[in-house]
Image (tube, helix red, strand yellow):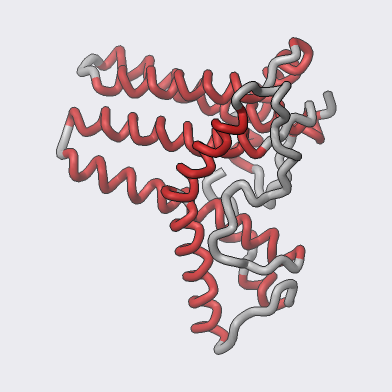
């Protein structure tokens, strides 16, 4: 397995590279040799996140420490699933949606657990804010890449709109078609409106600042969608 193939093509890597990528790549090498597919890794780190949420809901400081450790392990696995898919040429649309949706499920569970220790409205607000910040981060990176590839920043392009391998074949994932349909539908209801909002807001802000719409691939757009605001959380 080549490490270069496992690394996701992102404009910025600093925090992820320093903290989580080394153990994730070591795990990827072992999983690739064992012939493990990425989807079970996604399910595994989702279960770790749900276990952490259950511990957060408890009142024991020891449980909270264990939850914190589980969340760090979840982050390592969350880095490993995509790297495994890229290094073994098993990137699929289903895998992308599965990762996005199950991460959201874990976030909901964690903030629901926090609500056990304080006002539920604050936990709900924090979940909404985190979800929007993550959407802004994802779309900032998408816009950065689009500005340098000449792609139109069309609102509503799915979060799985990065280059996707051909869909999972029936022999690779029995029932994968139904699963893909379900996860894609969930994405379209929960995340696609956020993508539309961020990209429309970005276009409106550029128009406000420059007096006109930006042209795909133009120097102005590349300067607007710069690395200072891209992938800031990773």
Is 1 placed left or right of 194 in the picture?
right
Inspect this view and state whether residue 101 appears: yes
Please tell me which residue is depicted at 66% across the width and 36% down the height of the picture: 17
State which quarter of the image contains the N terminus.
Answer: top right
Residue at far left of view: 119
Inspect this view and state whether residue 19 appears: no
Where 152 falls versus 171 (above or below)? Answer: below
Q: Position of residue 12 (x, y in %)?
A: 66, 49
Q: Where is residue 24 in the image (x, y as percent from the top left)?
A: 65, 24
Q: Which of 148 and 155 is in front in this view?
A: 155
Q: Which of 35 and 123 is in front in this view?
A: 35
Where 217 falls versus 126 (above or below)? Answer: below
Q: Position of residue 10 (x, y in %)?
A: 69, 48
Is 214 placed left or right of 232 in the picture?
right
Is 136 placed left or right of 144 in the picture?
left
Q: Position of residue 41 (x, y in %)?
A: 59, 21
Is 139 placed left or right of 3 in the picture?
left
Q: Which of 187 and 49 is in front in this view?
A: 187
Please tell me which residue is depicted at 26% across the width and 48% down the height of the picture: 125
Residue at far right of view: 2
Please tell me which residue is depicted at 56% across the width and 57% down the height of the picture: 139
């Amino acid at each position: 397995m080549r490490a270069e193939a496992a690394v996701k093509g992102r404009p910025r890597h600093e925090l992820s590279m320093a903290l989580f990528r080394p153990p994730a790549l070591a795990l990827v090498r072992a999983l690739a040799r064992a012939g493990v597919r990425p989807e079970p890794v996604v399910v595994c780190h989702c279960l770790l996140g749900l276990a952490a949420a259950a511990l957060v809901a408890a009142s024991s400081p020891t449980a909270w420490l264990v939850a914190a450790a589980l969340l760090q392990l979840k982050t390592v696995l969350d880095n490993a699933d995509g790297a495994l898919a890229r290094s073994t040429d098993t990137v699929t649309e289903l895998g992308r949606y599965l990762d996005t949706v199950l991460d959201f499920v874990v976030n909901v569970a964690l903030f629901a657990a926090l609500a056990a220790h304080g006002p539920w409205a604050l936990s709900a607000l924090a979940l909404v804010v985190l979800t929007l910040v993550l959407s802004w981060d994802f779309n900032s990176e998408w816009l950065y890449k689009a500005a340098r590839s000449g792609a139109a920043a069309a609102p509503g392009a799915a979060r799985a709109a990065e280059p996707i391998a051909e869909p999972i074949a029936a022999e690779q994932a029995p029932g994968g078609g139904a699963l893909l349909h379900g996860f894609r539908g969930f994405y379209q209801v929960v995340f696609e409106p956020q993508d539309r909002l961020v990209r429309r807001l970005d276009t409106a802000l550029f128009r406000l600042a420059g007096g006109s719409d930006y042209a795909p691939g133009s120097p102005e757009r590349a300067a607007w969608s710069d690395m200072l605001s891209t992938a800031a959380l990773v």
